[in-house]
Image (spheres, helix red, strand yellow):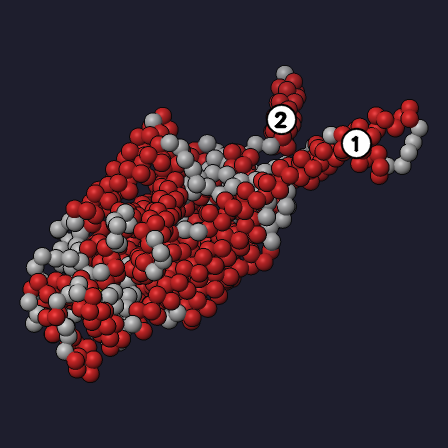
Amino acid sequence: MESLEELSEEETPREPTSSSSPSWKLTGKEILATKTQNYFAQTKRIKNILIQVAFSIGLSSIWRFPYLCQRNGGGSFILMYFFMLLLFGIPLLYMEMIMGHWLRVDNIRVWKQLIPWLGGIGYASILVCILMSLYKSIIITWSLSYLGNSFANFLPWNQCPLVKTINVTDLSCLQTVSHQYFWYHTTLSASGHIEEGVEALVLRLILGIFAAWCLLFLTMITGLKTSMPGGEDNYIQMASLVALINLGTSLLVTSIIFIVLGFWATTSGPTCVEKSVSKLMNLIKKGVLPQDAKPPEDILLLPSLDYLEWISNLPQHLQYQVIHSTPSCSIKTQKEKFMEGPGLAFAAFSQAVSLFPGSSFWAILFFSTLVIMGLNTSIRILEGIVYPLQNSISIFRRHPKLLSVIVCLGGFLGSLIFTSHSGSYIMSLFDDCLVPLILIIIVAFQNVALAWIYGARRVREEIFGDLGRPLWSFFTVLWCYVTLPGLLALTTICLMQLYQTEPPHYIAWNSSMSQEVKQPYLRSTLGWVTLLSILTFLPIPVYSLQHWWYLQDHIASDPFEKLQSKNMPLVPPKPLQLPKRHVKSQEGNGESSSKKLSLPLIRGLNQNPWWFSLPLSRNSQSSSWFRLPVITSLTSTWSIRSLSLPASRQVSPASTAIDNSDQHTGTEEEKRHENSVQ
C-alpha cells in the first residue's frame, strides 16, 4: 500500500499540502482496487475458457472421429467435416445456445412456450438422449476393462495370450497384431456376426457396465453438474470455440492413430517374420530357448504363412515358448485395413502406450482419462433426461432422487444387450444407423419450428427486446436457407442408405482368418431400426393431437346455433367509437409499451396454445409468415376458435374503456326512452 502511494506521489504533480494528501491516498486505493478487479476478471475469463475447453473435448473426439475418418477416406472426410462444421455445426450450436440463454428453460418447456402444438419435440429429444446413454455406457465399460488390465506388471495386449493348450485357433493370434486380437477375443469375446450370441452375455462386461452405471448414479445424486458457464454474451465466439477445439482434438488423436496404423502396416508380413526369426535366434544363443526351437535356414525365403505352418508342427511345449517369444506384429500380410470398427482407438492407443518406458503408468493415465471423459459425456446426456422430467412431473420434483434411480436402473437393464457376444455390432448399429438418423430429423424439426413457423425475424426482434442486443442476421439467413435444406438432404441420404437394395454393412471379426470382414445387416435387423425410430418420433404427433383434443373439449359443438339462439349478430352493426382522450394516451404510450412487452409476459397472457402466430397488434410486424388461421380455415371450428379466443383472452385498457363507454351510453338512452314513455 505504501509503495502504491509513493508511486502516485512521484507521478502526480505537487499541489498544496492541505488538499493533496487525501487525494493521493484515494488514488492509491483506486489503483489497487482497479488492479484487483482486473485480476479477478482475468481469472474468471481464463476459468470460463478452460471450462469451455473441457466441455468441448468429449468421448467422440477420441473414440468416434478417428475410426469414422479412417473408414471414410481420411483427408477427404476431414475436408467435408470442416465444411459441414462451418455451415451446419456452428450455426445450429449457436441456435441451441442462444435459445437456452434467451428462454432459460429446459428442452421440454422451450417448445411448449414457443410453439405449444410442437411441444412433443422436447419429449422426442428425451428419447434420443436415452438411446445415446445406453450405448455410451458400453464405451465406458470397455475403458474400465482396459484400465483394469493396465495395472498388470506386463501389459496383456503386448503379446499373444498365454494358454495351456495350443491349437490352430490359438495360432490365429500370430496372423494379426496382438492388440487387435486382445480387443476382439479378450475384451469383447466377439461372435462372427450380429445374429450370433445375442442371448449369451459376457460376465466381465456385465460387471463393468454395472460399475459404470453405479458411478453415473453416484454422480447424479451428488448434484454434480457439467454445464457450460453462464453469463457470457458472445455466444458466437463460444460456439466457434467449442467447435474448433473439438475439431483440433479430433485431428490430433486421429493423427496419432494413423501413425500407429502405419507402424502396423510396415511391420506386417515378411518384416514380421524376419523380426520373429531374429528374436528366436537371439534367445537360442542366450540359452533361453533350446536348439529344437531353431527355425529352418530358408524360412525367410518362403511365404509368410509357411512360418505359421512350421510353428504348428513343433511340439506343444515348444509352441508355447515360440508364441510367447514372438513380437507384436502380424505375420500375415495385411492387404486390407487393419481395423475399421469402433475398437480402433482402444487397439491403437494400447499399442502407443506400450512403446513408452513405464508403459503401465501411461496406460493407467490414458484409460483413466478415457473413463473420466466417458462419464462426463454420459452425465451431460443424463442431465438432459433427468432435469426436464423433474420440471415436468410433480412427483419427481418432490422426490428428485427417485428419477435418478429409475433412469440409472433402466439404463443398466437396457444396456445389457451390449454386453453380449454380438454387443459391439449392436452398438455399431445404434451409432451408425439409428441415432444419426433420429438426431438429424429432430434437429430439422427444431430448425423448421424456430426459423419458419415461429419466424426468424420475430426471433431476432424478441431477442433484441429481451436481451438488449441484436441477433446476427447472418445466422438467421443460415437457419432459413442453408441448414434446413442441408438437414433435409442428409435425412434423404440416411434413408436411402438404410433402405437401398444393398443393405448397409458392419465390421465383424472372422476368428478363423484373424481379420475383420464386412457383414451386411439383415432386413429384420433394419426393421428394429425403423421401429425404434417411429417410437422416438411418436411424441411429436401425439402431443399435437392431445392439444387439438384439449381445444375441441373447450369449443362448442355448433357455435353458430348458440350465436343465433342468443340473437347475437356475427358482425357489429356499427364500428366502435374510441374515446379521443384515451386514443391519444394510447398513441403516446404505444411505442414505449411495445418495447417493454417481453416474450415471457406474452406467453403468460396467451393461454391459448394455438394463438402463437397471431400478431399482437395491428401494427405488429414481428409475427412470422406462418398463420394458423390460414391453415385451419378449412374447418369452421378451428378458424372461429383461432379468431375469437385472442380477443376475449387479451384484455387491454382500451377494450375496457370501450366497453364501459358503450355501457354508459346504453343506460342513458334507456333512461331517456323510459321518460318519454312516461
Camera-near label (2 vs 1) is 1
Decide: is 105 above or below 125.
above
Image position, residue 280 (x, y; %): 20, 69
Quadrant holding the C terminus: top right
Position of 155 with respect to 615 (left or right) is left
Where residue 429 appears, as percent x and y from the top left, is 26, 58
Can residue 198 be seen here? The reply is yes
Return the residue found at the far right. Answer: 16
Residue 380, disc: none
Q: Looking at the image, which is closer to me, 419 or 260? A: 260
Depicted 560 relative to depicted 75: above or below = above
Q: Residue at x 83, y 30 (%)?
A: 24
Residue 481 on image: x %, y %: 51, 62
User: Which of 445/490 is in front?
Assistant: 490
Q: Residue shown at 29%/65% (left/top)? A: 340
Q: Quadrant of residue 426?
A: bottom left
Q: Residue at x 6, y 67 (%)?
A: 315
* Tags 2 and 1 touching, CB below 8 Å: no
Residue 131 visible to an observer of this rendering: no
- Check residue 5 in the rendering and tell me which mark sits there, or answer none: 1
Q: Nearer the viewer, residue 43 or 446?
A: 43
> Quarter holding the N terminus?
top right
| 395 sits left or right of 303 in the view | right
Q: Residue at x 80, y 36 (%)?
A: 7
Q: Which residue is mark 2?
A: 660
Q: Amino acid at mark 2?
A: Asn
Secondary structure under tag 2 reads: helix
**Residue 288 place in picture, x, y as percent:** 17, 63
Secondary structure at badge 1 equals helix
Amino acid found under the numbered disc labelled 1: Glu
Classify mark 1: residues with Cα within 10 Å, few (<14), some (14-19) or many (20+): some
